[in-house]
């Protein structure tokens, strides 16, 4: 009974600790840069310019779905379940990420031409 309470509390404490360390480290880094003469507005202008995040996540999730579907088909034909699912998920998920990379690369070359 006590383990059922301690484990979720430990997981929550671990996640909180990781976030706290990241935030305080970033704050200390920014303060030291400001002390050395960096412009504070530098931190406001740093934003990701890539708009391919949605494309990347979409193709990754499509690939994972196709991997699960393909693995289920292979298991029904007699392939071992323990090998089929991880292999197909990784294979199709990776293919989705490669496809998103190629599509972003193609989009960037089009922007350079224009």
Image (tube, rainbow, N blue to C red):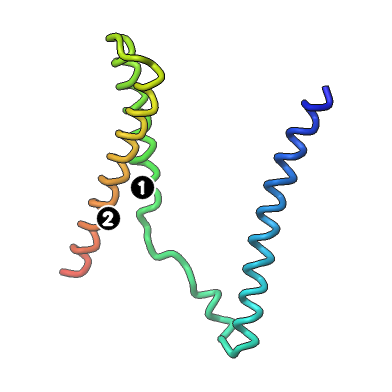
Circle 1: element type:
helix
Q: Which of 27 and 51 is in front in this view?
A: 27
- Residue 1: percent from left, percent from top: 82, 22
- Neighbor class of circle 2 (other Cα within 10 Å; few <14, some 14-19, many 20+) is some
Mark with earlier residue (1, 2):
1
- Residue 56: percent from left, percent from top: 36, 47
Compared to 49, does 40 lie above or below?
A: below
Please say if the residues under marks 1 and 2 sit with CB atoms less than 8 Å apart. yes
Q: Nearer the viewer, residue 42 or 32?
A: 32
Compared to 75, does 83 lie above or below?
A: below
Q: Which of 34 and 42 is in front in this view?
A: 34
Report the residue marked by disc 2. 104
Q: Which residue lies furthest to the bottom in this view?
A: 37
Compared to 42, does 10 lie above or below?
A: above
Give the residue at x 33% y 13%: 75
Compared to 81, does 53 lie above or below?
A: below
Quadrant occupied by the C terminus: bottom left
Residue 56: which numbered mark, if any?
Answer: 1
């Amino acid at each position: 009974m006590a383990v059922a309470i301690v484990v979720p509390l430990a997981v929550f404490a671990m996640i909180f600790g990781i976030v706290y360390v990241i935030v305080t480290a970033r704050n200390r880094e920014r303060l030291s840069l400001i002390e050395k003469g960096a412009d504070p507005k530098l931190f406001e202008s740093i934003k990701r310019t890539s708009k391919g995040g949605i494309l990347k996540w979409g193709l990754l999730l499509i690939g994972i779905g196709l991997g699960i579907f393909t693995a289920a088909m292979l298991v029904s034909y007699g392939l071992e379940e323990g090998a089929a699912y991880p292999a197909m998920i990784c294979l199709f998920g990776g293919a989705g990420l490669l496809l998103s990379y190629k599509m972003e690369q193609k989009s960037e070359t089009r922007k350079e031409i224009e």
